[in-house]
Image (spheres, rainbow, N blue to C red):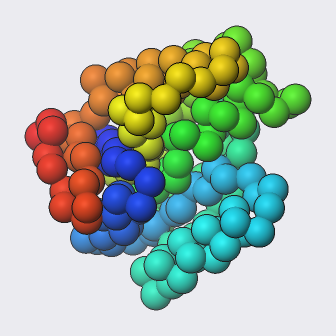
Amino acid sequence: MLCVVTGGSGSGKSAFAEQTVSAFGADENVYVATMMCFDEESRERVRRHRIMRSGRNFVTVERYLDLKGLSLGEAHGTRAVLLECMSNLAANEMFDPGGSKENALTEILAGVNALREQCDLLVIVTNEIFSDGITYDESTREYQKLLGQINQEIAHLADQVTEVVYGIPLMMKL
């Protein structure tokens, strides 16, 4: 099963996604972290998310690039995976020197499919970054285009799509 969770910054999407994984009742919960920490703000965000996950039996795997190369090993019973978040992974693949650059869309979607094969439930968190009305520079517009394409593709593949607004989950696709 594939679930996509989206929403704006601070919307509650991470908490909803973690609850979704926990409620699934898998024997093994894996948290795939994609955020590279560059400053104190990003380190604080990571700390906050670790606190939110504490006590929920998540095994954390940090994977910033090459999602399709991630092997979780043999599952011992059912496995649920939470990928947090697609926005970071897309930026990493697009801008990091080791990223897949112009092949990011293809590589990320191949990674999603590879991850789906390794679990019973895959929950992907992504961001809604398209409605602020601000005009951005060319590289940011290219990033938005990439993330929009990824979000459309994973939503199409998904069994469930949820947008979280002010902590309220709105089921978009069931």
Q: Is residue 154 left or right of residue 143?
A: left
Which sits in the foreground, 12 or 21? 12
Quarter containing the N terminus: top left
Asked if 140 appears above or below 37 in the picture, the reply is above
Find the residue positioned furthest to the bottom: 55
Q: Is residue 84 above or below residue 152?
A: below
Please indicate, yes or no, whether residue 170 appears anywhere in the rendered image: yes
Q: Quadrant of the C terminus?
A: top left
Q: Residue at x 66, y 34 (%)?
A: 91
Q: Is residue 86 left or right of residue 16?
A: right
Q: Residue at x 45, y 68 (%)?
A: 28
Give the vertical position of 171 relative to 74 (above or below): above
**Coordinates of residue 7 in the picture (x, y in percent):** 34, 48
Judged left or right of residue 91, residue 84 is left
- Residue nearest the observer in this picture, 44 or 30: 44
Residue 78 visible, this angle: no
Q: Residue furthest top?
A: 102
Q: Quadrant of residue 6?
A: top left
Q: Nearer the viewer, residue 143 or 73?
A: 143
